[in-house]
Amino acid sequence: MSQNSAPPSTRERIVVVAARLIQRQGYVGTGIKQIAQEAQATLGSVYHFFPGGKAAVAVAAIKYGDEEFAAVLRAAMAAEADPGAAVQACAVELAVGLRESGWTDGCPVTAAALETLGSDSEIQRACAQALLGWERIVEEKLLGSGFAAEDAREVATTVISALEGAEVTAQVARSEEPLRAVGRQLARLVGSYA
Amino acid sequence: MSQNSAPPSTRERIVVVAARLIQRQGYVGTGIKQIAQEAQATLGSVYHFFPGGKAAVAVAAIKYGDEEFAAVLRAAMAAEADPGAAVQACAVELAVGLRESGWTDGCPVTAAALETLGSDSEIQRACAQALLGWERIVEEKLLGSGFAAEDAREVATTVISALEGAEVTAQVARSEEPLRAVGRQLARLVGSYA
DNA sequence: ACAGCTCTAGAACGAACGCTCTACTCAGAG
DNA sequence: CTCTGAGTAGAGCGTTCGTTCTAGAGCTGT
């Protein structure tokens, strides 16, 4: 995720701003000019760094969002010994973050993924890889807690899907409750394998 | 959901086509002219029936999609006595439908909801109401199976959120497996309350 | 026959879209 | 010093967007 210190380069600013805008407004709803303006860059700079145009910017932005959430997920899994408690804590963390953003900053890939389903674009591939990577993180935590291989895979899929859906529900309802409720139920589900 | 026989009116054709297009391409990605063309209507007709413009068409389309899925959900809940089995059967049905549509026809409200989060529009309210209504259907099934009130509400939220997320995951992965896996896990979760 | 209404039909408008293009700045190599 | 290439800057391209507008077709009640 690049250096933390030092002022971010133009390219970095473009990617970060694009990631946030796509997360909030979707791929179609976000314009290249808006990205350039909010990133304090010019159109020329954007096309200089991303000759592939809007799609190339979006792919970079989604990969950035992917890694960003993966880090959150890894930290949450590592913070608690019990996998059920870890999942629940993660849901609560998402709920708090969502409220603090005014219910705007949801899953960084869902919106873009849904809009580009028809065209088997590189954007869609980046979204698929992000989801798969997140499932892997949960799966490994479960495997480390003694889960059978098949159970771990299936429960991991369920955890990521449920969190994703709960985030959408929470955004639409403008309430933390869906994420908190799903977190509790996921903890119960994970615990039922002990 | 109007009469099944008789050729559909122009207004009906517009709503049905709009619902399908928004489901596949999102709100921003779907144009008024495209809706008119695919519904075999003209721009004049669209604005005649929906003086509120694009947003009004979208609200009607989302309400249509809401009722459409609610009917599927109600039928699935009624088909099986055991609530866990009913939820799982519903997931399988969604998986099959998704594959048959070429992975394009997902949740009718998710895409539109995510795109209109910033502006507290009527579209967003329609999406929120749809999700809430679906939760109610599941909740009542659980209550009828002896669930405590609080458990029923929370599990219903989890079921709808998980199905929603699993549908997105299945669409992106172009596979029935996420929906089938989540269906099994949800059945397990529901069963754990017996 | 005629008025009155619903609905159809599509040309036209200004704004915004993604993208291309040329012109410019400026630090470092020779 | 000149030269070069990376990066900045934005005007302008053609297209499409949502919307408005006028004109007329088709039907009904009188």
Image: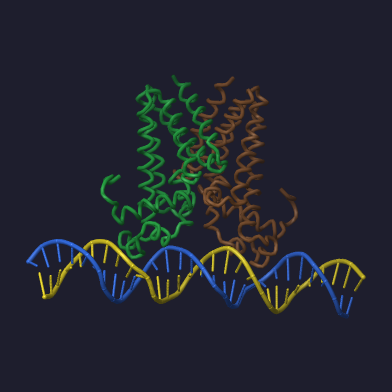
Chain colours: A brown, B green, C yellow, D blue
In the figure, residue B193 lies in which quadrant?
A: top left
Tell me what residue is drawn at x 44 percent, y 19 percent: B194
Residue closer to the observer: C12 or A62:
C12
Residue A133 in the figure: left or right of residue B45:
right
Decide if residue A118 is on the left or right side of residue B12. Answer: right
Picture coordinates of residue C5, whole percent (x, y): 20, 65
Q: Please name whichever residue, B78 or A102, is drawn nearer the observer in this view of the structure.
A: B78
Image quarter for residue B94? top left
| Pick the front one: A193 or A97 | A193
Residue, x 43% and y 46% (percent of image)?
Answer: B108
Asked if B125 appears above or below B81 in the picture, the reply is below
Whether residue C9 sits left or right of residue A127 in the image: it is left
Residue A127, position as x, y percentages in the image: 60, 46
Whether residue A155 is situated above or below residue D7 in the rendered picture = above
Establish if A66 lies above or below B143. below
Q: Is residue B187 visible?
A: yes
Quadrant for the N terminus of chain B, please: top left
Expressed as whole percent of the image width and height from the top left, the position of residue B156 reads 43, 32
The quarter holding residue A35 reads bottom right
Question: Is any part of residue A95 visible from this angle?
Answer: no
- Can you give x and y, in whole percent of width and height, for residue B154 in the image? 44, 31
Number of labelled discs? 0
Relative vertical location of residue B39 with respect to residue B73 in this rendering, above or below: below
